[in-house]
Image: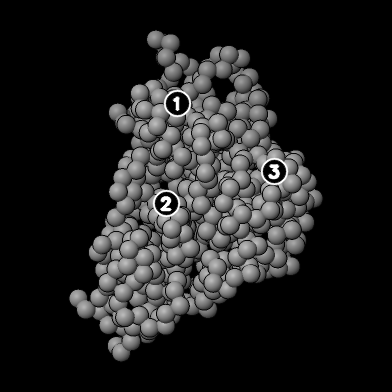
Amino acid sequence: MRKWWQERVVYQIYPRSFQDTNGDGVGDIPGIIMRLPELKELGVGILWLSPIYKSPGVDNGYDISDYRDIDPLFGTMADMERLLAEAEKLDIRIIMDLVINHTSDQHEWFQKSRDQDSRYRDYYIWKPGRRNGKPPNNWTAFFMGSVWEYDQKSGEYYLHLFHRQQPDLNYDNPLVIAEVKDIMRFWLDKGVAGFRLDVINIIYKASFANGKPSLIIRGLEHYKSQEGNHQILRELRREILDKYDSFTVGETVMVDLQEAKELCDRERGELDMLFYFDHLEVDRRIARYIPKRFRAAKLLQVLTKWQQGLEWNAVYLENHDQPRIVSHYGDDQLHWEMSAKMLALMQFTLGGTIFLYQGQEIGMTNFDFTDMKQLNDIESHNINTLMKRLLLPAKLRWYWIRTASRDNARTPMQWSGAKGAGFSTASTWLGINKNHSDINHQEQLSRPDSIHSFYRKLIAFREQNDTLKYGSFTPLYARKNVIAYRRALADESYTVILNFSPVPRLTPFSGTVVLANTEEKTFAGKLAAYGAVMLIETNETVKYKR
């Protein structure tokens, strides 16, 4: 049976960068309420909010100090309740970002756990050091360095897979699982429609033995996609989520296809869908920061693996942790508009639930950073420190970080070309891209051929088209950075042809155009630079010269 979340487009909001209404340079919940009409007009049916809970903000809200309260930076619980009510009037549902692998070290649970006699001691993972005075094991954190931090007050080390101010919860303690259930129930009762679950395949630690040698993360084999993790997800589904009309999408760490199927195949009763990263790493080595040459054929191979391998896909090209897609796989200078539309057409012709990220619908680009001082992202600064230790030249370090930093996606939303980009009247928490005078929502609303208009068209078309949502996926062609694939359901099928090259390309296809990033109605085989077409496929209308 088809679910409502399979039919709607999701729009991710990074609240601190979406819309400021109180003049403090930070976006807020009233700003989201203010922009609901624009989101409805775009065709959005679900909003995903990055964390708005009370937090010290060490990792921009992914360090939660109170799961049942709103951070004053964003507003009040009354604001949140009003947002839910106003969104409901427009038939827009809201999902929350829920971080349950770790909390902030300022959370009441952690502060109390520092007392060895506290009932909260086992809410977190505490271990004595080894006899040689070293930490309990050799694991390394995702934000670099050891996963262990010594706490003077309690005389032991606590585990943190991420920042030292993000201590990991202990899922061997049933009280922790009970707390998570109560938190989910609290928000579902308020009217949220589900959760995006942060780093959800690493919450259970099966062993604390030393990790195998690794170039990046040591210890991963002891906590990635463990059976205990699956048991927790099934329990949350059975006892909480199934009692509501809700859905979950999980962010996963280094997940392969088999692990993904075990997390979200329907019969498993765990997640509804998940985010993987393979399709955004075809031009990356080992980590996001180390580039290699892009090959569209490799991208098609990766898309095919996931489109054919999973029962249901979460289809995304951008989020708060990734560079802007037009700067990544497109050309954000000479072919900015064509490549942004080409990537949009690719996304909307893949099967699954579509996830857009704020600003993607107007082709926002990577930020024009000039040095490290402009970056807020803790990960970028930690990567820079590591690369310094490895004696990498400053120029190379900066190039890698500038193009891959998470802050590229976190700059304020460009609503207008005015000072402050229509986002704020104050000095903003993160810089505003200078190109907002040219790339902005207001300017694109006035143009029927804009990127924003193209997204509206794609959303409206897909809403009425089951083939693009539910149909099969078949790769057809990959040559000279041109790829083609077929989407088919029952007696309807489409051929999608995409040019990832800055020069025109000849292809072996021809036929009648249904969607394209140009004005052509009939396709004779030649794609423009970054051209994209979708052809209706019948025996007469699509020709493919093999």
| Label 2 sits on residue | 328
Contact check, label 1 and label 2, Cβ < 8 Å:
no
Q: Quadrant of residue 339?
A: bottom left
- Badge 3 amino acid: Val
When the figure is inspected, residue 215 is found, relative to residue 468, above or below; the finding is above
Looking at the image, which is closer to me, 92 or 331? 331
Q: Position of residue 437 (x, y in %)?
A: 61, 54
Q: Could you say whether the residue bearing mark 1 is in a helix, strand or loop?
A: helix
Distance Cα–Cα, label 2 vs label 3: 26 Å
When the figure is inspected, residue 345 is found, relative to residue 116, above or below; the finding is below
What residue occupies the far left of the structure in this picture? 546
Distance Cα–Cα, label 1 vs label 2: 24 Å
Q: Could you say whether the residue bearing mark 2 is in a helix, strand or loop?
A: helix
Q: Residues within 10 Å of mark 3 (few under 14, many from 20)?
A: many
Q: Is residue 472 visible?
A: no
Q: Nearer the viewer, mark 1 or mark 2?
A: 2
Give the residue drawn at x 29%, y 68%. Answer: 505
Looking at the image, which is closer to me, 430 or 11? 430
Q: Position of residue 439 (x, y in %)?
A: 57, 57
What residue occupies the far top of the structure in this picture? 132
Q: Residues within 10 Å of mark 1 (few under 14, many from 20)?
A: some
Q: Is residue 199 left or right of residue 214?
A: right
Distance Cα–Cα, label 1 vs label 3: 28 Å
| Label 1 sits on residue | 385
Give the residue drawn at x 40%, y 55%. Answer: 329
Q: Is residue 285 left or right of residue 331?
A: left
> Which label is found at residue 26?
3
